Amino acid sequence: MAADNWRIEVNRGNCIGSGMCTGTAPDHFALMDGKSTSIHEYAEPDDAVIVAAESCPAEAIRVWAANGTVLAPEQ
């Protein structure tokens, strides 16, 4: 894992399965049992991940920088 990788978390309890994230960042998200899941917990920085988190209608996605700062969604 690279030192600057982002951590991606999907709160499946909040997820409504809209698929916005899978359409926006298919390399990072998949639908499983009607809910989103991150394909990898850690990923190289990718603007598509931020867009997916910001566009999630249930705000079920959180993205953290390597230093622990929340990158998305904006608070």
Image (cartoon, rainbow, N blue to C red):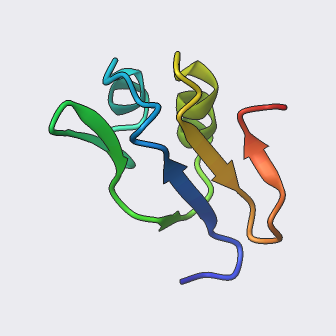
Q: Residue furthest front?
A: 13
Q: Residue at x 58, y 33 (%)?
A: 53
Indicate left or right for 30 with 65 as reference. Answer: left
Q: Residue at x 41, y 38 (%)?
A: 13
Q: Is residue 27 visible?
A: no
Q: Residue at x 80, y 31 (%)?
A: 74
Residue 43 image point, x, y percent: 51, 63
Q: Is residue 16 above or below residue 71?
A: above
> Which sits in the foreground, 11 or 65?
11
Q: Is residue 7 visible?
A: yes
> Which sits in the foreground, 75 or 39?
75
Res 8 quadrant in image: bottom right
Indicate left or right for 7 with 29 as reference. Answer: right
Residue 32 image point, x, y percent: 18, 42
Q: Residue furthest left?
A: 33
Q: Is residue 21 above or below residue 57?
A: below
Res 69 quadrant in image: bottom right
How many badges with numbers are in the image?
Answer: 0
Residue 46 image point, x, y percent: 58, 48
Indicate left or right for 4 with 37 as reference. Answer: right
Q: Is residue 3 above or below residue 69?
A: below
> Which sits in the foreground, 40 or 27?
40
Q: Is residue 70 above or below residue 54?
A: below
